[in-house]
Amino acid sequence: MQKGYSFDSSALERAADAARQLEMSRNAKEAFEMARLQEFTKQKEYEAAAKQAEVQIQAQRSEQIRVAEEERRKTLVEETKHARARAEHQDQLARKRQEEELTIKARMQAENLKKQEESVRKQEAMRKATIEHELALKHKYDLEKVEAETNARAKAARQNRDINLEQLRASEEERRKTTIEKIKTTGTVLGVGLQEFLNDPKKIVSAVASITALAIGMYGAKRGTAVVARQVESRWGKPSLVRDTSRVAFSELFRHPIKTFRTAFRTLDDPLKGIVLSPELEAHLRDIAITTRNTKRNHGLFRNILFYGPPGTGKTLFAKSLAHHSGLDYAVMTGGDVAPLGHDGVSAMHKVFDWAEHTRKGLVLFIDEADAFLRKRATEQISESMRATLNAFLFRTGEQSKKFMLVVASNQPEQFDWAVNDRLDELVEFKLPGPMERERIILQYFDKYIATPATSGSKKARLKLADFDWVKKCTDIAQKTDGMSGRQLSKLVIGWQAAAYASEDGVLTTEMIDRCTHEMVNQHKQKIMWLDREQLSVRQFGHRIPEELSNPISHSQKERTVS
């Protein structure tokens, strides 16, 4: 049996009771107002929840749109990548096809060139074979022609032998008769003339006088020519001992007229131009130059000077500059040239001084390495010819001259004969350059041999400079080259130039400078060691250098062999 629906009214009753109690309560109005506010609050909460839901919905929609845009962007990027990859692949395929086409074309060209070369080779071989065949035929034809001509001449000679012999016999007979007639005629004429000459005393006297006059004339011309030649040589000819001179000679006048004209009419410059020395030595040498110039101007007696010091310190250079500044000519001779002359040294020495005495402008006679022949006569081992040459030198320099100034240079002045020292009026020592002088010398030669050619702008100039402070570099090099002379420093800078020329691009770098400087410094130390060893051997053994000092390597090898 189905049970029917029943309505529970207890809840409504309780609500009605609550409403009656609320109406009867004193706070009914406040309670109603509170209920209304609660209802309003609930509505606001529902509205806020609805708005929050709408915001969430909008955020979800925005996120969906962003995700969709991101997906679309990624899709575009992937499509772009795929398109780029396809384009690169197509480009690679096109390049590969082009390379293959070029390879095929090059191979075809090579094959065509090879075929052409083969064709040319075959044509050349055919042409060569044709020429050889033609030459062989021509040679064969020439041989046959020569053989035929030879046979024809031989046949004709055999046929004409009797005729030729008869003609030869007749011509020889005629020549013999003619010769005999000439001899007879000549003898008759000479006999008649000699008979007439002997029968006439006047002709005999005249002939003797003519022959005597002719002999005297020939002898006088020979001797006179020799005297004139000696006078011309003493005045204008350069002696054999003089290595270099600024004095004008006839041969140089005709050989180099422009150079001779410039030399004769040059202006006077600073005597120390281009020469780097210490300030004290520069002042001393400048005083010597002024004194020499005033002596020449006032026709006074020149003083004889000794320049001594290590080689390469500027002695020869200043002697030439001194002559130029003073308006004098200069002549340079070397003491080492005197010894090979032997017995001719005396006459050669007199020729030098005769030549110096006949100068018009005056002369600075510079003798380099003078200790080679001006050694002490009492203690040194010198030959008789060298002793005679030294005596001739002492004889010609016994008095001061108005014509020439004697400048003697030596690395070992202590070896001079005392008579030579007595003829020297002033001694000047040329020392090795100090740090400041070395820096000036290096800068001077660097500007001359490297900086000027590198910055000249000439198309032929291959030398270039790398980007570095070369002034500071030269200063550093000057500190490392202690003990080097001016000549060695110039060779050092020339070595830098050679290193730049030897490079591929012709650029001078600091590495090249350091390498060349290191090598030059080591070589200088080796030379100093050799010099010290030689001086030690001279002090201990005289002039003989022991074998164990002169060649230490071979001595050590001998010791190892003995052991």
Image (cartoon, helix red, strand yellow):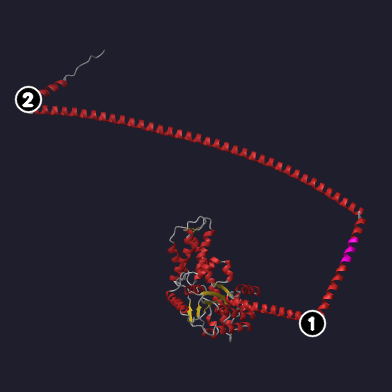
The dominant secondary structure in magenta is: helix
Q: Residue at x 34, y 32 (%)?
A: 66
Q: Say if residue 535 shows up in the picture.
A: no
Q: Residue at x 86, y 49 (%)?
A: 148
Percent across and percent down for residue 47 are 21, 28
Q: From this viewpoint, which residue is outermost toward the top?
A: 1
Question: Closest to the observer: 209 or 2?
Answer: 209
The verdict on residue 554 being magenta is no
Question: Closest to the observer: 265 or 100?
Answer: 265
According to the image, label 2 marks what residue? 24
Vertical order, 520 against 1 (above or below):
below
Is 73 on the left-hand or right-hand side of 422?
Answer: left
Vertical order, 146 against 440 (above or below):
above
Vertical order, 382 against 268 (above or below):
below
Percent across and percent down for residue 54 are 26, 28
What is the magenta range? 170-178
Crowd rating for badge 1 (residues with CA inside 10 Å; few <14, some 14–19, many 20+):
few
Is 83 on the left-hand or right-hand side of 166?
Answer: left
The verdict on residue 176 being magenta is yes
